[in-house]
Amino acid sequence: MLRLVIFGRQGAGKGTQSEALAEHYGAPHISTGDILREAVASGTAFGLKAKEFMDAGQLLPDEVMLGVVADRLAEADVREHGFLLDGYPRTVGQAEALVGLTPIDVALNLEVPEQTVLERLSSRRVCEGCGRNYSVSVRPGHDWECDSCGGKVVQRDDDKPAAIAQRLATYRDETVPTIEWFDSKGLLVNVDGLGTPEDVTERLFAAIDERLSADPERRTHP
Ligand code: AP5
Ligand code: MG
């Protein structure tokens, strides 16, 4: 059982790395962004409202996100295997709500400079079907089919310049204090997010394993 949250500014590689960590540690990857994009794709009233916030690069209200996350954490796979939480919490209010729901073993902060994430976000393409990430810097072109599910691979609506600028500003204003909150609780581990995805994954494995071996009970509720 591993209960982990992963931070990093937009485009730092949270989704990419969470997939590798989920496979290695056997804990489900929970991306609040992916959950919201599924709601958008299904065309529900909630999804339509969420899309307005997301396309503007703004956060949904804390109480709405708490409901989304509490429902997911109550599912059987999480109770059995733990979770890799990607994209939640993003505000100090969300962090306080989260630790009211569950203990956290470790909070990772994937450090990537702003200039690098701007390049990654403008190169990112995403499968509409399963959410898998691609990069045109690795695989040029457009109108691809997803290698995993055959779905259409497109640019995310919030990967346009105005939305990216707003998302990075929100990160500075809301999420940096949230990361500092986890640091103040002794739960934060900073990890260099530069290099190939495989290099970063190896660093994350080392950071998690060191953290867990230093804490035999693996329960560090603040
Ligand atoms: P969300 O989907 O979580 O977006 P985000 O935080 O902006 O993060 P990203 O998904 O953009 O980046 P990532 O770190 O996952 O990077 P990735 O692995 O894709 O949230 C979207 C929206 O939903 C929010 O703006 C908000 O509106 C709403 N929302 C979600 N959670 C919320 C919450 N808790 N509260 C309120 N609102 C919420 O990598 C990026 C690219 O780089 C990819 O193309 C990838 O292939 C490439 N790449 C990855 N690693 C490397 C590497 N090492 N080298 C080169 N390229 C790499
Ligand atoms: Mg992501």
Image (cartoon, grey):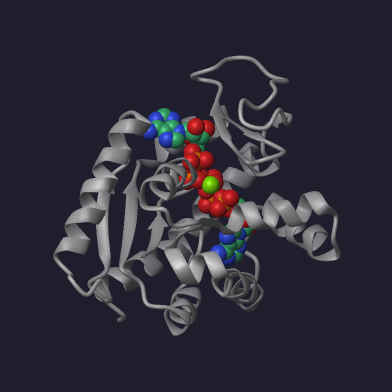
Which percent across, then down, holds residue 17?
41, 43
Q: In which quarter of the image is the C terminus?
A: bottom left
Q: Is residue 102 above or below residue 90?
A: below
Give x and y (percent) for residue 166. 58, 51
Is 147 situated left or right of 107 in this image? right
- Near-viewer residue (120 or 220): 220
**Residue 24: image location, x then y, percent:** 36, 46
Q: Can residue 167 be seen in this view?
A: no
Task: Tell me which residue sits at (57%, 75%) in the image.
Answer: 74
Q: Can residue 177 be spotted in the picture?
A: yes
- Asked whether, in this view, residue 218 is left or right of residue 138, the answer is left
Q: Residue furthest top?
A: 140
Q: Quadrant of the N terminus?
A: bottom left
Q: Where on the picture, by quarter, is residue 46?
A: bottom right
Marks counted in the figure total: 0
Relative side of 122 to 208, left or right: right
Quadrant in the picture for residue 202: top left
> Residue furthest toward the bottom?
100
Q: Which residue is drawn at 65% across and 37% down?
A: 160
Q: Which of 187 and 170 is in front in this view?
A: 187
Residue at the left extreme of this rendering = 214
> Relative to 130, does residue 147 appear above or below in the rendering?
above
Residue 167 x %, y %: 56, 52
From what the image shows, is residue 136 above or below residue 66?
above
